[in-house]
């Protein structure tokens, strides 16, 4: 769904402070000379920088690329003096009052008074460069929101899945649907930048993560599942790795979901 325009810098800060921001698990970006990007095969690695930057934009631009109908681009000053460009999507659901901000790319730009951006040309920099203390305070505000948030997190998980490309998104969607079917009152959340599924009073029993060449479906419980999933070193790390050419055995995965959800998992 396309988010109504315009979106303001203040609104972005409010959404982040309300725990409505997550990192995309993967993204694709061109590697231009003189511009530093995170590795598109491994996803976003500048986790400590992303949230404080979202709360300190000095400029926002609508993403004009056809494949980013909900996309925006923001520029923020880093406390070390560098400028960050963050690309993000605003994904909304009909049953949620606020959208989720999904950061899809982050890159550094060099310049003292202006920077040159391949999409938006010359951009005059803000004179307001945050101190390290101010930067850390932004992060603390976000972490406080995460600790006090008691929402089920379904919107964040759906946004995370929507950000996955191609076959990875299909696998994640099917896994999410299996869990929804087998555990109707499941609680969802994005923790440590990974979607988790849990049962109230018992903890988190499943999660998934996307890598460059496979999607890992993980299960957590106090004993081994039957039959044992092929990956993992113990009951709390049982997993199934799926590559693009692998078939998903939905009946077997559903059985593992039921078994894991019936036993104590990892604490909230």
Image (cartoon, grey):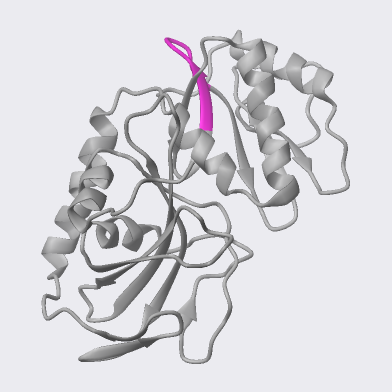
Which quarter of the figure is the C terminus placed in? top left
Residue 192 in view (yes/no): yes
- Vertical comparison of 4 with 63: above or below: above
Residue 234 in view (yes/no): no
- The magenta segment: 196-204
- Vertical comparison of 160 with 87: above or below: above
222 and 180: which is toward the camera: 180
- Vertical comparison of 121 with 96: above or below: below
- Residue at 82 percent across and 49 percent down: it is 244
- Residue at 53 percent across and 34 percent down: it is 158
- Residue at 75 percent across and 47 percent down: it is 167
Q: Where is residue 83 in the image (x, y as percent from the top left)?
A: 29, 78
Q: Position of residue 233 (x, y in %)?
A: 69, 35
Residue 202 part of the magenta segment: yes
124 and 170: which is toward the camera: 124
Relative horizontal placement of residue 148, taking residue 192 as reference (left or right): left
């Amino acid at each position: 769904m396309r988010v109504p325009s315009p979106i303001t810098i203040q609104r972005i800060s409010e959404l982040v402070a309300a725990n409505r921001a997550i990192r995309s698990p993967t993204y694709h970006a061109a590697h231009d000379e003189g511009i530093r990007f995170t590795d598109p095969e491994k996803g976003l690695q500048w986790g400590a920088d992303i949230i404080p930057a979202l709360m300190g934009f000095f400029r926002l631009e609508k993403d004009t690329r056809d494949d980013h109908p909900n996309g925006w681009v923001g520029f923020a000053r880093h406390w070390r003096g560098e400028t960050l460009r963050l690309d993000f999507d605003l994904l909304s659901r009909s049953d949620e009052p606020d959208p989720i901000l999904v950061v899809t790319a982050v890159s550094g730009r060099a310049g003292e008074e202006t920077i040159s951006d391949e999409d938006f040309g010359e951009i005059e920099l803000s004179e307001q460069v945050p101190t390290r203390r101010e930067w850390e305070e932004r992060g603390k505000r976000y972490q406080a929101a995460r600790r006090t948030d008691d929402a089920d997190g379904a919107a964040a998980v759906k946004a995370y899945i929507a950000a996955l490309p191609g076959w990875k998104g299909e696998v994640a969607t099917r896994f999410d649907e299996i869990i929804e079917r087998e555990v109707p009152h499941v609680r969802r959340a994005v923790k440590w930048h990974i979607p988790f599924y849990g049962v109230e009073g018992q903890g988190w029993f499943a999660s998934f993560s996307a890598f460059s060449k496979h999607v890992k479906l993980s299960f957590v419980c106090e004993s081994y599942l039957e039959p044992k999933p092929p990956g993992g070193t113990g009951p709390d790390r049982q997993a199934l790795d799926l590559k693009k050419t692998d078939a998903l055995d939905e009946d077997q995965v559903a059985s593992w979901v039921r078994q894991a959800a019936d036993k104590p998992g990892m604490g909230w």
